[in-house]
Image (cartoon, grey):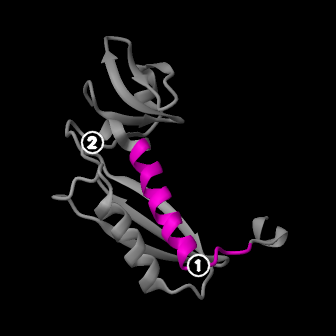
């Protein structure tokens, strides 16, 4: 990793601000500065979201009841990404699905123009999608106490 990369070490995620002989300093999305000693590299997995690139994929999850119109949900999610001012349109926009016992999970995978806009971008995607979902009265899954255990 290098300065500007978005990394996750253990429970900490953020942009690398600096690194030295003993530690790496990251800025979290909550604007906290975290110093992580290098010995964590020997005991924790390190995930690098952008490896020096300006873009970093953003994955946003949405959940619906099993009987939802999957074609409509996929179309809405794709359109939400396609029309966002933050989307790097030259990079792929992908919607994938996974079945769960309580409903269907959709993942919208796309790229902001700048990785630093990750959370603003995700908020924009959720807002656009939820507005469209409401217009079509799409049903979210109902989770009972038994399913939550």
Q: Which residues are magenta?
A: 120-142
Q: Which residue is mark 2?
A: 50
Residue 81 spot, x, y in % from top left: 34, 61
**Residue farthest along the left direction in this orientation:** 90
Residue 115 falls within the magenta-colored stretch: no
Residue 46, by quadrant, is top left
Name the image quarter holding the C terminus: bottom right
Image position of 71 with respect to 61: above or below: below
Residue 2, by quadrant, is top left
**Residue farthest along the right direction in this orientation:** 145
Disc 2 from disc 1: Cα separation: 34 Å
Name the image quarter holding the N terminus: top left
The residue lying at 24 percent from left, 45 percent from top is 113
- Mark 2 vs mark 1: give the one in front: 1
Residue 104 spot, x, y in % from top left: 56, 77
- Whether residue 105 is visible, yes or no, is no
Image position of 97 with respect to 16: above or below: below
Residue 133 spot, x, y in % from top left: 53, 72
How many numbered circles does the render carry?
2
Disc 2, SS: loop
- Label placed on residue 138: 1
**Residue farthest along the front direction in this orientation:** 135
């Amino acid at each position: 990793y290098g300065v500007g990369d978005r990394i996750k070490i253990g429970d900490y995620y953020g942009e690398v601000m600096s690194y030295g002989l003993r530690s790496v300093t990251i800025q979290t999305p909550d604007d906290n500065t975290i110093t992580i000693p290098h010995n964590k590299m020997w005991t924790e997995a390190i995930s690098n979201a952008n490896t020096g690139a300006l873009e970093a994929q953003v994955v946003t999850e949405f959940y619906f009841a099993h009987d939802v119109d999957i074609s409509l949900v996929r179309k809405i999610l794709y359109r939400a990404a396609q029309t966002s001012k933050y989307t790097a349109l030259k990079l792929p926009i992908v919607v994938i699905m996974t079945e769960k016992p309580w409903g269907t999970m959709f993942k919208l995978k796309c790229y902001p123009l700048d990785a630093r806009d990750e959370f603003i971008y995700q908020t924009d995607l959720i807002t656009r999608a939820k507005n469209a979902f409401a217009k079509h009265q799409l049903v979210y899954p109902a989770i009972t106490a038994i399913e939550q255990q």
